[in-house]
Structures are given as structure tokens and as C-alpha cells.
Amino acid sequence: MDQLEVLDWPVEIPTVTQASYPRLNGHHDAWIEALAKGFAHPTYLLQTSRERQVTGTLPLMLVKSRLFGRFLVSLPYLNTGGVWADNDASAKALVDGACELADRLDVRYLELRHERPVEHPRLNFRRNDKLHMRLPLPATADELHQSLKSKLRSQVKKAGEYGSTVHWGGKELLAPFYSVFARNMRDLGTPVFSQRLFASILDAFAGEAELCVVRQGSTPIAAALLVHLEEVSEVPSASSLREYNRTNANMLMYWHLLQRSIERGSATFDFGRSSLGSGTFKFKAQWGAEPHPAEWQYYVRSGSVEAMRPDSAANQRLIRIWQRLPVWLTRLAGPPIVRGIP
């Protein structure tokens, strides 16, 4: 019989051997440290054990605001999290504990960002409309270049004709990175994450997280955060300015992101999630990215998961209003709002 504990962060996440439910990004100490500091959310670790051997873990954060209410999430900002366990009984015990914690904290819903579903009677809603897009990387950039279709190779080559320059670094590039990111989020009608969140990620992943900034002259026109972890490189946040689309700056940036990942010895490049057939799905697929399932599961206690989706009618109206605000205002107002959105 598994024993369940609910631990307050910070606490070291132990290794679960021979996991039936795989280890995901959200199970790494560095990610939890970065998100806990960047968002300042109350953070918990659920842990099951048998005969003093850890059999499963589940990190959770309490996302709360006066505007939206309270949610229990594993984990905000990341595409993956949820249960990491070596057997079905441990997985069930972790979900039992998470649902009990959700009841105790009186949240609207519990959100578990799985890739493999956990069968549990209290998980009463599921979203699998988006897919993870991942590219198996070859040993060299030359091999990758040869694998690309001629149209894409031409676009990358054309990007080099505009004189754009590519820069790599850490916190010294945070200001230009954030200037592009905040502008792009405003244009999309989305509240922007805080600059503190990205600083926390760079701190937690010292030597394994870096910023890429593309400049046209002295002007930053595209930027991305690249994180390397256990032979996987991922881009949790990337943006480019629309008025510079003619320069193919986004193509140039992603080519350099892929090159960098190969140089770092990564076997996989994770582009993030996209809806099947969407523009971002097609953008990632042209690089050779392959779709993988995303199973986000919920224990809904009140309201609707759909109400928080950006494509709901009410949120579409708010998006249009946000797009008309000046960037300086969205940089001030965005972070307090977005930290309360699961």
C-alpha cells in the first residue's frame, strides 16, 4: 500500500525508477524553483512511497487572483507536468491526494498537464486538442540543412541577405528579449509574463538556459528563450515583430536555435504545443517536427474549463481591447494579470 505525503516546496524531488508514467519537464527541480520564484505561487509536492522507496511524485502550484479565482496546476507556464509514477496504484494515489488538496484549497479546478492520461474517476474533463511538436535532431547542422525542403532553405538563406545579426547571452540580453516579447504579446492580445519570471529561469538553469536576440542594426526584432535539459532543447517563449516579417527574422532565429541545440548535444528539439492544422502547427511541421499527444486532465469543482480559453466569446472581446493598449501599459498591467491565469 502506497503512503502519500504532501510536502511544501522547497524540497528535493527524488528519482522514480522504472516509471510507468514518464518524467516530464515539470518534475525537474530547476523548473519548479524557477516558477516558484518567478510567480511567487504557493508550491506543493505530493509524494508516494512504499517500503521507504519513492514510487511517485506530483508537483502542484496554487494559482490565484481576485480576478479569476483559484486553481491548482501542474504546472503553469510549462506544457508538461502532472504525475510521475512507477505504477498505476501510485498514479491513482497521487491524483487522489491532488483532488483532496484541491478540495481543501477550494479551487475552481485541478489541472494536470499530462502526456499519458491517468484513468481516475474524479478527473471529469479532458483536453487533447493540442499536440506537442518535436523534432528529432541529427548529429550535425549540415544534416539538418539537407533534410529541409528547398523552399525553407531558401527562406533561411534569404533572411541572411537583410543583414540581421544573431546574439546569444544571458541576463545581459533580458531587456532586448523582453522588449520584443512584450510587444508581440500585446499584438496577440495576451497579458505578458513578468521579466522576473525569465530572470528566474536563467538563474535556475545557469549554463543551460540562454537568450537569442536577432537585431536589425541596433533594433531587436526577434527573440527567444532556449532551455537545454537532458538532451532536449525547448523554446518556452519566442517572438518576432510583425513589421519585420519581410526580413524572415523568425526563420533566421529558428535556424540558429536548431543549430545551437545540435551544438549542445541535444537529441530532440521541442517547439511546444500547437493546434492541429493551425499556422503555428504548419510552421513547426515544415522544420520536420512530429506531433505527440498532450492529455491535459481536470478535476472541475466549479465553473467551466472552457471559460478560461482565449477563444471563448467573452475573452475574444478582452483580447481586442488589450491589442489597442499601449505597450508600456501592458508591461505594467500584464504580469499581475497573467500570474493568476492557469
Image (tube, rainbow, N blue to C red):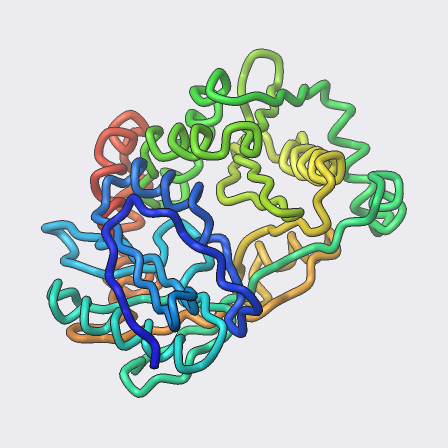
Pick the quarter of the image with the C terminus: bottom left
Q: Quadrant of the N terminus?
A: bottom left
Does any portion of residue 124 appear in the rendered image? Answer: yes
Q: Name the one closer to the observer, 52 or 46.
A: 52
Q: Is 263 drawn above or below residue 162 in the view shown?
A: below
Q: Is residue 252 left or right of residue 43?
A: right
Residue 148 in the image, given as x and y percentages of width and height: 83, 49
Q: Is residue 119 above or below residue 264?
A: below
Query: Farthest residue in the top direction?
Result: 218
Along the horizontal axis of the image, is 79 left or right of 33? right
Image: 300 above or below 257: below
Which residue is pictured at 46% across the width and 20% down the height?
171
- Measured as percent of width and height from the top left, residue 335 is found at 26, 37
State the residue in front, 78 or 338.
Answer: 78
* Residue 115 x/y as whole percent: 51, 69
Kindly indicate the quadrant of the structure image that contains residue 259.
top right
**Residue at the spot x=59%, y=28% of the render?**
212
Q: Residue at x 28, y 42 (%)?
A: 322
Q: Residue at x 30, y 62 (%)?
A: 46
| Farthest residue, direction front | 51
Residue 291 quadrant: bottom right
Can see residue 342? no
